[in-house]
């Protein structure tokens, strides 16, 4: 019998990017995240942002290609309407405008500067 694989957690989610300054401006200035790690390389860069127990990495590596067609992380917010207004003030593009998702949650899908999608979510209260 083959030993079964046991995944204990995910290490991080990667968002491919093309420009470090533009990525930092979006993830730090607009989303309000704080970089917990950053590194510039000859052919790219790497940024990490911890959110609770999880990490979003943003980077430029030869094997990473930005795309709005891949999976995306969904960020839970404390005030949905205030967050949507903040994003609009910063002219963040919406892939999907705010909507009510079953069972009554609020959600929207935004795009980062490279076209990667991130969900904005507020659980039904």
Image (cartoon, helix red, strand yellow):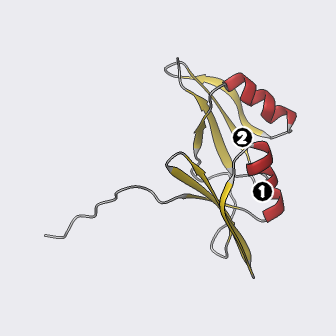
Element marked by disc 1: helix
| Crowd rating for badge 1 (residues with CA inside 10 Å; few <14, some 14–19, many 20+) | some
Most extreme residue toward the left is 1
Would residue 4 appear left or right of 26 to someone viewing this image?
left
Q: Give me the C-alpha separation between circle 2 and circle 1.
A: 16 Å
Which-is-in-front pick, marks 2 and 1?
1
Which residue appears at 34% of the width and 59% of the height?
Answer: 7
Is residue 109 placed above or below 21 in the rendered structure?
above
Picture coordinates of residue 13, whole percent (x, y)? 55, 56
Query: Measured from the top left, where is residue 120 in percent x and y?
Result: 64, 35
Q: Quadrant of the N terminus?
A: bottom left
Q: Do we see residue 32 in this rendering?
A: yes
Q: Is residue 1 left or right of residue 41?
A: left
Identity of the residue drawn at 51% across and 22% down: 102
Residue 50, percent from left and from top? 59, 52
Q: Which mark is residue 24?
A: 1
Residue at the disc numbered 2: 110
- 2 and 1 marks in contact (CB < 8 Å): no
Q: Secondary structure at mark 2?
A: strand
Residue 54 is tagged as none
* Residue 19 visible in the shown view: no
């Amino acid at each position: 019998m083959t030993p079964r694989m046991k995944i204990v957690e995910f290490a991080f989610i990667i968002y491919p990017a093309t420009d470090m300054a533009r990525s930092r401006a979006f993830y730090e200035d607009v989303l309000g995240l704080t970089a917990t790690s950053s590194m510039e390389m000859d052919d790219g860069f790497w940024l990490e942002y911890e959110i609770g127990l999880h990490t979003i990495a943003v980077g430029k590596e030869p094997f990473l290609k930005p795309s709005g067609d891949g999976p995306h992380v969904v960020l839970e917010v404390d005030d949905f309407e205030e967050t949507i207004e903040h994003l609009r003030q910063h002219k963040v593009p919406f892939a999907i405008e705010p909507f009510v998702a079953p069972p009554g949650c609020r959600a929207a899908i935004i795009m980062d500067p490279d076209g990667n999608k991130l969900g904005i979510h507020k659980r039904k209260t």
